[in-house]
Amino acid sequence: MRHAFLLLLSCALAGCAANPPPTPSTADGVVTLDVRRTAAPSPALGDIANDYVRLSLEIGTHEDGYIDAYYGPADVKAAAEAAPRDKPALLAATRDLMARLDLAARRITDPMERRRAISLRAQLRAAETRLLMMQGTRFAFADEAERLFGVRPRLKPLASYDADLAKVEALVPGSGPLPTRVETFLDRFTIPKDRLQKVFDAAIARCRGRSAAHIAMPADESFRLEFVTGKSWSGYNYYQGGYHSLIQVNTDLPIRLSRAIDLGCHEGYPGHHLLNMKLEELLTKGRGWTEFAVYPLYSPQSLIAEGSANYGIDLAFPGASRADTERDVLMPLAEIPVPSDDRYWQLLDAIKALQGARLTIAQQYLDGAIDRATAVAMTQKYLLMSPERADQSVRFAEQYRSYVINYGLGEAMVRGYIERGKPDRDEMWRRMAKILSEPTLPADLLRR
């Protein structure tokens, strides 16, 4: 994964890679970060950041869902939405900000301010790309991913997953199509609708407890959980600011037990909710970096967000602890009979090894190499889904396009960074805290 994108931003702002980040400290095993400023923030950079916030909010008026979160001053948002520039004017303004940033960066000497500048430029490049797409420009899947999310995916051919399919076949023997057998087996672990609230409450509480044991959280943090329908995704976190989130879970399709811990960690702790809280606490409030008060969905920040949220599941529940929690706590709450062996968890692990196929299918479909019917069929085959779940997966790719790389590829990159050198558990959590609390880009995850 060491691609040319490593040079993309450092060429514009040379020297940043050698600058050290803030040093985490621990108290009773809980990671905190020193946010004291080592130098006064750059006035020019502050002005550019403020203009970037206004720019992002204006872009958001042209595309529903472009702004994933905003918790800055309400009057700034109201002004942006009251008189937004058109898309060509916004594209010109984006390029002007990039030029101003390049000029200002030459005079920045503080290490964290330089990291801030690099992060801001990556966000602006993504904004430029998205504005071009809004006006009809179409990029090849890999080019789009690189421009929006800061990493160029190299995807494996679908045939490379055939050996993993064979492992699944061995776990679910019998006649009939393999996806049907897998769906039938997993349907036994569906959470009844009247038990969803209790199961998810318990799962999220355990995700939070395991995360709070290692990463300090604001005392007044909270979230609200809702069950919704009519979405192309299975779960979503809407960060509200003030250390509060709205977490929604889509019930269009039956929800299986495995999704409770998955979504509890991914949308909550140590996933999206915790990430957004730490950015607000340490960067927006702690350093006065206004640009972190707005989160454009189509930006490198999303690879960090989705990658850390996916990896956070394994970090919070290592080894057998996840199976133990599901067996001892969640299955009784869901009134699901506890299996007599570990085949259920073995099957989940085997299926996870196939997740990279989702990216290859999305690339082929969005690049026009296969049609929609083929994309659905390949999703059924390689992701072992029912026609309904496969259709939902393809609808997600249609709506969010190359965003799909942020899950599997993002997780692999975060895992590589956190587990590099085989650190102990405390060090792994310290590294996670750094990712969640700093202006981290995909390229940062590849530096040793």
Image (spheres, rainbow, N blue to C red):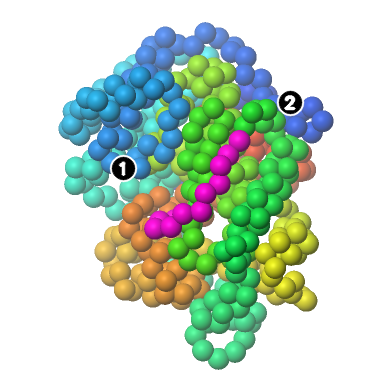
Horizontal arrangement in the rendering, residue 250 relative to residue 129 (left or right):
right
Q: Position of residue 367 (x, y in %)?
A: 29, 60
Which numbered circle lies on residue 329? none
Q: Position of residue 31 (x, y in %)?
A: 72, 30
Say which amino acid is labelled 2: Ser
* Inter-mark Cα distance, 2 to 1: 40 Å
| Residue shown at 62% from the left, 32% from the top | 221
How many marks overall?
Answer: 2
Horizontal arrangement in the rendering, residue 355 relative to residue 172 (left or right):
left
Horizontal arrangement in the rendering, residue 39 relative to residue 72 (left or right):
right
Q: Is residue 284 magenta?
A: no
| Residue shown at 45% from the left, 11% from the top | 42
Which numbered circle lies on residue 64? 1
Disc 1 packing (10 Å; few <14; some 14–19; many ≥20): few
**Residue that carries the numbered disc 2 in the rendered image:** 25
Start-end of magenta stretch: 222-233
